[in-house]
Amino acid sequence: MQKERQLKEKEKSKKQILLRLSPTLWNELAAWAEDDYRSINGQIEYLLSECVRKRKNE
């Protein structure tokens, strides 16, 4: 139970990173994020999470 709580607390604290993207990729992500009703940060986090999840299932 305590481990679960600690894991959830870790998930709440997010790490910040600097990410450089080309203007073309930024525009594509922005349009995709808008289609999915997400912020660009939310979209990038969603896409990375999906890639990690898929990789674990391979």
Image (spheres, helix red, strand yellow):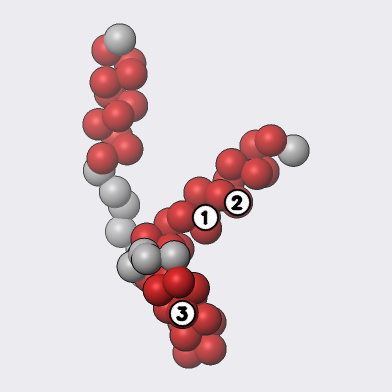
Badge 2 marks a residue whose secondary structure is helix
Image quarter (top left, top right, bottom left or bottom right) of the N terminus: top left
Badge 1 marks a residue whose secondary structure is helix
Marks 3/1: CA–CA distance: 17 Å
Residue drawn at (46%, 55%), measured in percent from left and top? 46
Q: Amino acid at mark 1?
A: Leu
Image vertical order of residue 9 relative to residue 45, above or below: above
**Pointers 2 and 1 in contact (CB under 8 A)?**
yes
Badge 3 marks a residue whose secondary structure is helix
Image quarter (top left, top right, bottom left or bottom right) of the C terminus: top right
From this viewpoint, is residue 15 visible? yes
Residue 44 position in % (x across, y down): 45, 63
Residue drawn at (56%, 49%), measured in percent from left and top? 50
Image vertical order of residue 10 relative to residue 3, above or below: below
Q: Which residue is mark 3?
A: 31
Q: Nearer the viewer, mark 2 or mark 3?
A: 3
Marks 2/1: CA–CA distance: 5 Å
Q: Which residue is mark 2?
A: 51
Q: Amino acid at mark 3?
A: Ala
Tag count: 3
Quarter location, residue 42: bottom left
